[in-house]
Amino acid sequence: MDTILRIDNIYKDFSGLKVLTGVDFSVKKNERHAVIGPNGAGKTTLFNIISGKYKPSSGKIFFNNKNISGKPVHVLSHMGLCRSFQITNVFQELTVLENVRAGVRCRHGLRYNFLRKPDSIAEVNEKTEAIIDEVGLSAAMHAPARELAYGQQRSLEIAITLSSDPELILLDEPTAGMNRSETLEAIKMIDRVIKDRTLVIIEHDMDVVFSLADTISVLHYGTILASDRPETIRNNQKVKDAYLGEEAD
C-alpha cells in the first residue's frame, strides 16, 4: 500500500520551549491512523504543522511524495489535505446547507456571482446534499447552525471538511464534549464518511480510537514512543506506563 503522508524528523520549539523533538511516522493510503498521548504531548502542535498553520523548526512533511513543509492551509486544501478543528468552526447564522455549499462552491472554483443564485447550480447542490446526507444532517438541512445540538455541530464541521473533497482528513478530537450516545453515533458517522479516504485522528477517548484506528502512534514528550497495530499498542508495557494505564486492561 502506498504511503500518502510521511512525517520526517519534525522538531518544533516556541521561543526555546521544545514541543516536538524528532517526530517520525508514516500513513498509508486509505489507512485510519490515530495519534494519542497525554495532555501536553504535542498532538495539536503536530496537527498544526501537518495542516499548515505552523511551520516546523526543522524536519519535513511529505504528502503524496511532495514536500509540503510550511505550505499554507489553503494550498494544502487544494492538494487534498483538510483538517477539522477541536473547537467547532462553522458560520453560526448560516444554515447547514449554506455552510456546506460554500465549501463545495470553493472546491469547484466558483466565486460568488450577484447575477447567479448559489442554489441555481445543480452540480453544487447535488454534491452539497449528498455530503449533508452522509453526515446524517438531512433533517436539519435548512436549520441555522446555531440551532443545532452540540453533536450535530461537530457533524456539520466534518461536513464542511468533506466539502473540499479531501483525500486525507485530519480530525482533532471530533467527539470531545459529547455524551456516550453522541459518541457512538459519531463513530458510526466517521466510519461511514472516511471510506476511500485516509484519516489521521487525535482522540482522547480510547473507545473511539480502538473502534476506528488501523494504526496508533503514541506521542510522548514530543516524540513517538510507539507506532503499531491497535492490539500491539494495547499490550505495549511502555505505552501502558506512559499513557494508557488501566484503560488498556
Image (cartoon, helix red, strand yellow):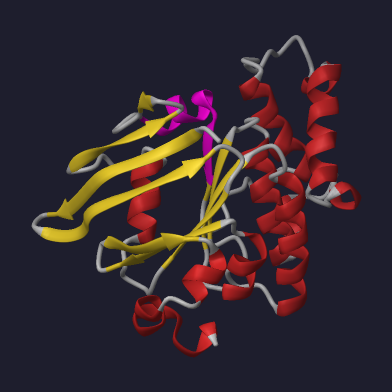
52 inside magenta stretch: no
Q: Which residue is located at x 55 percent, y 66 percent?
A: 230
Q: Which residue is located at x 30 percent, y 33 percent?
A: 69
Viewport quadrant of the C terminus: bottom right
Q: Which residues are magenta?
A: 72-83
Q: Residue furthest left?
A: 16
Q: Is residue 1 left or right of residue 3?
A: right
Q: Quadrant of residue 186?
A: bottom right
Q: Residue furthest right?
A: 139
Image spot of residue 224 (x, y percent): 32, 60
Image spot of residue 202 (x, y percent): 49, 60
- Name the foreground residue: 247 vs 158: 247
Vertical position of residue 38 compared to residue 55: above or below = below
Image spot of residue 10 (x, y percent): 25, 46
- Name the foreground residue: 99 vs 25: 25
Viewport quadrant of the N terminus: top right
